[in-house]
Amino acid sequence: MKKLFLVPLLLGGLLQNAGLTATQAKKTTRIPARKSLAKRPPPVDPTDGDNIDGDDLTIRRAAVAALGPQSGSVVVVDPASGRVLTMVNQRLGLKTGFTPCSTIKLVAALAALSEHIVDRDTSIFTGRHIAYTLTTAIAKSNNQYFNILGTRLGFERVTRYAQMLGLSEKAGLDIPGEQPGVLPPEPPKYGGVGMMTSFGEGITITPLELAALLSAIANGGTLYYLQYPRTQVEIDQFAPQVKRALELAPNGIADIRMGMRAAVDYGTGRRAGYDPSEPVLGKTGTCTDFRLASHMGWFGSFNDVGHHQLVIVVMLAGSRSFSGAVAAGVAGAIYRNLSEQRYFAADTGKRPGFPEIISTSPCCSR
């Protein structure tokens, strides 16, 4: 038994011989933990390689400032014409596509309304004592509600409405480098069509595709080809090109707009709100894209203003901290910045979105 008491005595002697107290010895064990700081990914420059010829520089500066050194892309579109006003991180924004996460719920909602599966005020029980209407389900992004809608719709109808809304085809008209997203040929093996309509399982979309879809919701049902004029001649000759008018329930767009407004007022997109007199409507998306081993944060939105309405799509990809709420905060910062510059005020003679200066100067790309 006496030998057992020798262990702490010997240990204490070794520490004293090394010139360390017990407290100092404990502190030394914490030093290796600091190495985790070095594992954090370095800041990125999302503007690297962007060509900003033809961009609205006021909007671009606001978008670049809001995105900061995050891995993501921002697309801003005029919903009344389909003109791309700026695209930050063009290489990412034009890629093949990413899991849409909960932004796919907009497609499911429009399909369910048009097929009379549900109306705006129908309550669906997602638990024994829990029920949602369409408005609250969009606002809170309830997965079980949209799983039920997808199961009732079935794979063929979900796919048909997704195609009508522009998924799986290029959103742009002759935009160099654009690649379309993908719709699956069959329901996901695990979870079925309900996983498609709640998480976007098996589907990929691009920021441009989501921007085109949001533009159609914002303008009342016209799906435009997105165009990205780059020269002064292209800007002067710009004319909107209609892809198709959406065949939806008469009140379908108005009904989902209520849910999108609620998402910003009290739901998952609260960070996008900044001024009740210039309301923002949007839909968040948060998930993991396992194909890319990437965390995703989406926010597709538009503002409800009398002048210079914009569609803003924010897509964040990579960081574990990314979410739809974070993406909503980026969009909100853009709207707020432009509002402070009175971008949404009545016309003062100059037509916004048609810049007098077209430049690739570094001042406007960072």
Image: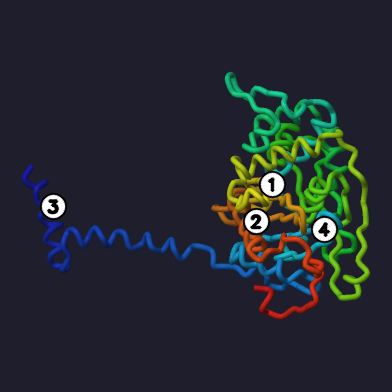
* Snapshot quadrant of residue 70: bottom right
> Which mark is on residue 179?
4
Instruction: Report how far apart the C-alphas of labels 4 and 3 lie in the structure.
Output: 68 Å
- Graded by Cα atoms within 10 Å as few (under 14), some (14 to 19) or many (20 or more), the crowding at tag 2 reads many
The reply to whether residue 161 is in sight is yes
Quarter holding the N terminus is top left
Going from N to C along the chain, the mark reached first, 3 or 2, is 3
The reply to whether the C-beta atoms of the residues labelled 2 and 1 are less than 8 Å apart is yes
Split into 4 quadrants, where in the image is the C terminus?
bottom right
Which mark is drawn over residue 196?
A: none
Residue indicated by mark 3 = 8
- Going from N to C along the chain, the mark reached first, 2 or 4, is 4
Looking at the rendered structure, the secondary structure element under dot 1 is: strand
Query: What distance separates the C-alpha of mark 4 from that of mark 1?
Result: 24 Å
Q: Dot 3: what SS?
A: helix
Q: What residue lies at 58% left-to-right and 20% top-to-bottom?
A: 129
80 w.r.t. 258: above or below: below
Write down the residue under mark 1. Answer: 282
